[in-house]
Image (cartoon, rainbow, N blue to C red):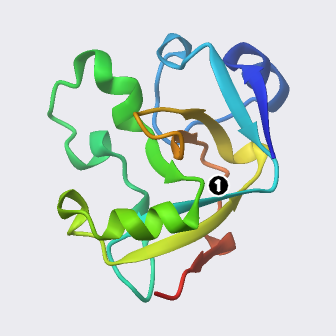
Amino acid sequence: MLTSSTIEDYIRDYRPVWAFELPKEFFPKEILIAEEHPFFRLAYSQSSYDTRDFMSYAEMNPNRDWGERLPLAVGLSLIDNEAKARKNLKLPMFRQYKGIIALTLQAADGVEKQTGTHRSHYTWWRTQSFQMSNLQMCSL
């Protein structure tokens, strides 16, 4: 389930320590909070996941000037539909990815917002409390 909220309320209620430091003003005002909500993320390997699968564009390219796109660059892309994630694996722009990670997010894991042109795409700003132990590789 995803619940609408504001970033101010989330910060007040959860006191998050973000995985990537950003001033509060960089977050969208309106956000979503996940509670036992399933998402999918593309992975570099078909059989396992590692920390590289959870690096943002900003972490992979720290010297790049992201300008106004910085909020999206520090977030991670998620897909809320497994069939759509499988379809994305076939697109040329995602050829570096070979697998799909299933994750179920909790409120303490960070905040999300539907972004991009597809309704199934979300940006996730994760917290340091997110644990990779709750992940599962999808069989392809």
Taking the spot 66% from the left edge, 25% from the top edge, the residue there is: 31
Secondary structure beneath label 1: loop
Q: Quadrant of residue 53?
A: bottom left
Taking the spot 39% from the left edge, 66% from the top edge, the residue there is: 87
User: Is the residue 3 above or below the residue 100 in the image?
Assistant: above
- Left-right relation of 49 to 91: right
User: Is the residue 9 above or below the residue 72 in the image?
Assistant: above
User: Is the residue 64 above or below the residue 101 in the image?
Assistant: above
In-front residue for pair 41/49 = 41
- Left-right relation of 4 to 21: right
Residue that mark 1 sits on = 130
In-front residue for pair 127/87 = 87
Percent coordinates x, y for residue 135 in the rendering: 62, 73
Percent coordinates x, y for residue 51 in the rendering: 42, 66
Number of numbered callouts drawn: 1
| Mark 1 Cα shell of 10 Å, populated few (<14), some (14-19), many (≥20) | some
Taking the spot 55% from the left edge, 34% from the top edge, the residue there is: 114
In-front residue for pair 109/118 = 118
Task: State whether residue 9 appears in this view.
Answer: yes
Percent coordinates x, y for residue 26 in the rendering: 47, 16
Task: State whether residue 51 appears in this view.
Answer: no
Percent coordinates x, y for residue 4 in the rendering: 77, 26
Taking the spot 56% from the left edge, 15% from the top edge, the residue there is: 24
Q: What kind of residue is marked 1?
A: Phe
In-front residue for pair 125/117 = 117
